[in-house]
Image (cartoon, helix red, strand yellow):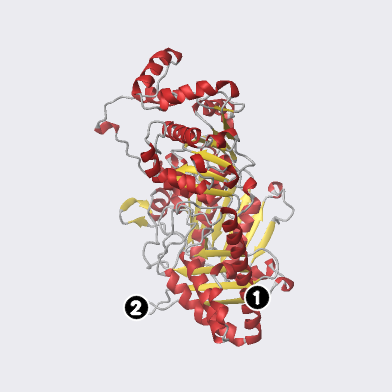
């Protein structure tokens, strides 16, 4: 297709895909034998070191600090269960982090199933070993899978554990998940009880990453807010502090928990009404034990950023989940019920977005056996939690509103006003869009943008619903529309008019563009300033792009002549080294970056994007859709090659297969690799 179309300022693309053939040849060099001896069995903590991403989400800075969270969460579980009151966190030079508590101490006696190993060594060297699989030892806990401490041990170049239990001190040292000393009895000890773990993350896994005092201090403060009875003592080597806001030593204790946190972040001048805080125990189980607890603190803001921060068993859940859904349900139903009670018929127009838009809130729940999405526990998925939280908060919210009717009316009227403004904005947008399109019927698969300024808008034509889903999350809702097409579209150069007229995918595309086709074409009715073909960075993607360009050339040539058609350039690879992320367009680009990266700066993690549908939305946005970072190729027809373009269309896309065969024979010697 190199003679079909050319892209400005870029070499003409080859009809063959050399890099793909290179991959195929490399694959063929691998032995075709596949026997029992080829099956690898990873033992102990080997899987963690081989695939750290499965256990802590990767090897970047976020995953690096997740190791600190795992150990701190274990100490907090002792606090929540009522066995500890104090936690000490110390960051020293050499990337050494020490976390200790005054709880019961990890058991050191022999484990029943591993007679020559202590329970401590079993916990630290065996995946899925711990005391939180039942409710015998912990009523509620953040650790659930029995992998937290063992994963940290596996990914640490050095770890030392001290256990003060039953007035006896024990110590054991580990390197990269393997014990290098026996469990040693250091004799009797007074006035000390609990577990102390010191560790250094392994540079072989994380490169030159260092603990951030700022992140660790923020983590400690959040844990202190989350449990009213705990005291956290923070210390950090002065040489590591570059941020003057972070103290070298601090004692963190907040008697009012979440309310103290919210008061620190807001002022009375910002608030529509006073902060509402509370806590409630969840219903007892069959044995009469309390099954959990909910604590909250919230306020509505006249000014300032809205924010909902949630936790489960002191674990931050930045992606929300079922507890947040129950929380939102309680608030929206309570506000609507208050409006109905005050005989306001408009209360039903208030939706969750109106309430959340100016809400700042902290929600913390403690429940048994929570279910999270993944080991990093960023989202709670326990289904019964929605009803638990909604029921617990709803009555108390109703009582809070009823306790001060004037304040409740003020809040309701404020939220109603926001709802009316939102509704009016939506109606204005719809009116503008309808006017601009003259009530054009749009295809159901189209996710349209909101702007009525055609010059600023663009439509991305993507392959399939999966890619469409990623693109919808990555797009700018105001200016970027998404139209997913199913598979490879009709080849219009070899299809009859009847087939063209009956093809739903092409009909959807024409309807979305709004400018008509053939004799009814009117470029002034075009609804978007740019039409961007965004397909996978592989052979199939190139084929689909070729079919779409052929369609525009045959049926809507004016769009090409007016410079409206573009090709997106998604990368094929992502390279991560420490905090540095690089995107490579193809194999050659990848090898070029690999040769330039300093191998001494740590391990380089290479990921290949299988397609747009499997590319994380943040990567798709940054590399391919955000105008600040992306590269677009404009599809053009050079003035002196119009006749040649017509010939190539006929040869390569037309009905006569013999013409394609002749073209291949003629140009076979022009390339040393064919994509077969």
SS class of the residue under badge 1? helix
Q: Which residue is mark 1?
A: 414
Residue at the image point whose x is 40% and y is 55% from the top: 146
Mark number for residue 286?
A: 2
Label annotation for residue 267: none
Q: Is residue 394 above or below residue 458?
A: below
- Residue count near mark 1 (Cα–Cα under 10 Å), binned few <14, some 14–19, many ≥20: some
> Which element type, helix, strand or loop, lies under badge 2?
loop
Residue 178 in sight in this render = no
- Above/below status of 581 relative to 30: below
Residue 474, horizontal then vertical, whole percent: 54, 48
Q: Nearer the viewer, residue 531 or 524?
A: 524
- Depicted 548 relative to depicted 262: above or below: above
Q: What residue is drawn where x is 52% and y is 21%?
A: 643
- Which image quadrant is residue 662 in? top left
Q: Residue at x 62, y 53 (%)?
A: 452
Residue 111 image point, x, y percent:
34, 56
Asked if residue 84 lies left or right of residue 421, the reply is left
> Quick one: 540 or 371, which is closer to the camera?
540
In the image: residue 154, left or right of residue 427? left
**Closer to the observer: label 1 or label 2?**
1
Of the 4 image quadrants, the one containing the C terminus is: top left
Q: Earlier in the sequence, mark 1 or mark 2?
A: 2
Q: Which image quadrant is residue 112 in?
A: bottom left
């Amino acid at each position: 297709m190199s003679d079909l179309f050319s892209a400005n300022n870029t070499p003409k693309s080859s009809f063959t895909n050399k890099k793909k053939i290179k991959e195929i040849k490399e694959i063929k060099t691998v032995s075709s034998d596949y026997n029992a001896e080829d099956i690898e069995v990873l033992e102990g903590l080997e899987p963690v070191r081989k695939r750290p991403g499965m256990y802590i989400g990767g090897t970047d800075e976020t995953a690096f600090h997740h190791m600190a969270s795992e150990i701190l969460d274990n100490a907090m579980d002792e606090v929540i269960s009522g066995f500890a009151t104090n936690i000490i966190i110390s960051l020293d030079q050499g990337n050494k982090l020490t976390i200790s508590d005054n709880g019961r101490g990890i058991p050191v006696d022999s484990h029943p199933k591993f007679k020559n190993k202590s329970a401590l060594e079993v916990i630290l060297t065996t995946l899925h070993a711990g005391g939180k699989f039942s409710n015998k030892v912990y009523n509620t806990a953040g650790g659930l899978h029995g992998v937290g401490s063992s994963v940290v041990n596996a990914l640490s170049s050095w770890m030392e554990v001290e256990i003060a239990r039953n007035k006896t001190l024990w110590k054991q040292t580990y390197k990269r998940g393997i014990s290098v000393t026996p469990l040693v009895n250091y004799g009797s000890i007074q006035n000390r009880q609990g577990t102390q773990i010191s560790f250094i993350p392994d540079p072989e896994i994380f490169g030159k990453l260092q603990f951030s005092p700022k992140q660790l201090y923020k983590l400690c403060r959040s844990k202190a807010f989350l449990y009213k009875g705990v005291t956290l003592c923070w210390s950090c080597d002065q040489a590591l502090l570059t941020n003057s806001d972070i103290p070298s030593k601090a004692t963190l204790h907040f008697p009012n928990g979440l309310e103290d946190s919210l008061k620190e972040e807001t002022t009375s001048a910002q608030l529509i009404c006073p902060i509402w805080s509370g806590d409630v125990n969840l219903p007892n189980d069959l044995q009469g034990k309390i099954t959990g607890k909910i604590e909250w603190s919230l306020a509505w803001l006249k000014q300032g950023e809205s924010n909902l921060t949630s936790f489960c068993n002191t674990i931050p859940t930045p992606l929300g989940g079922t507890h947040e859904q129950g929380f939102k349900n309680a608030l929206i139903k309570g506000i609507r019920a208050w409006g109905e009670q005050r005989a306001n018929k408009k209360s039903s127009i208030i939706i969750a977005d109106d309430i959340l838009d100016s809400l700042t809130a902290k929600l913390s729940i403690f429940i048994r056996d929570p279910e999270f999405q993944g080991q990093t526990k960023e989202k709670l998925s326990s289904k019964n939690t929605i009803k638990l939280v909604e029921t617990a908060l709803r009555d108390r919210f109703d009582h809070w509103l009823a306790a001060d009717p004037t304040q409740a009316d003020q809040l309701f009227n404020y939220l109603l006003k926001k709802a009316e403004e939102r509704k009016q904005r939506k109606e204005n947008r719809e009116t503008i869009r309808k006017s601009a399109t003259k009530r054009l019927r749009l295809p159901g698969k189209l996710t349209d943008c909101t702007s009525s300024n055609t010059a600023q808008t663009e439509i991305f034509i993507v392959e399939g619903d999966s890619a469409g889903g990623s693109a919808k999350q990555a797009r700018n809702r105001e200016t970027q529309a998404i139209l997913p097409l199913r598979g490879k579209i009709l080849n219009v150069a070899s299809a009859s008019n009847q087939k063209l007229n009956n093809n739903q995918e092409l009909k959807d595309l024409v309807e979305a563009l709004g400018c008509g086709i053939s004799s009814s074409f009117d470029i002034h009715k075009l609804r978007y300033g740019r039409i961007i073909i965004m397909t996978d960075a592989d052979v199939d993607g190139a084929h689909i792009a070729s079919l779409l360009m052929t369609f525009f050339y045959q049926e809507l040539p004016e769009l090409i002549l007016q410079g409206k058609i573009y090709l997106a350039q998604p990368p094929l690879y992502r390279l991560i080294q420490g905090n540095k992320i690089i995107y490579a367009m193809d194999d050659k680009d990848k090898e070029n970056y690999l040769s330039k990266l300093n191998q001494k700066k740590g391990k380089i993690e290479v990921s290949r994007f299988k397609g747009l549908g499997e590319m994380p939305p943040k990567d798709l946005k940054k590399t391919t859709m955000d105008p600040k970072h992306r590269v677009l190729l404009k599809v053009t027809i050079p003035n002196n090659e119009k006749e040649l373009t017509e010939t190539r269309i006929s040869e390569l896309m037309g009905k006569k297969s013999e013409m394609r065969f002749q073209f291949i024979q003629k140009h076979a010697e022009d390339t040393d690799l064919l994509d077969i």
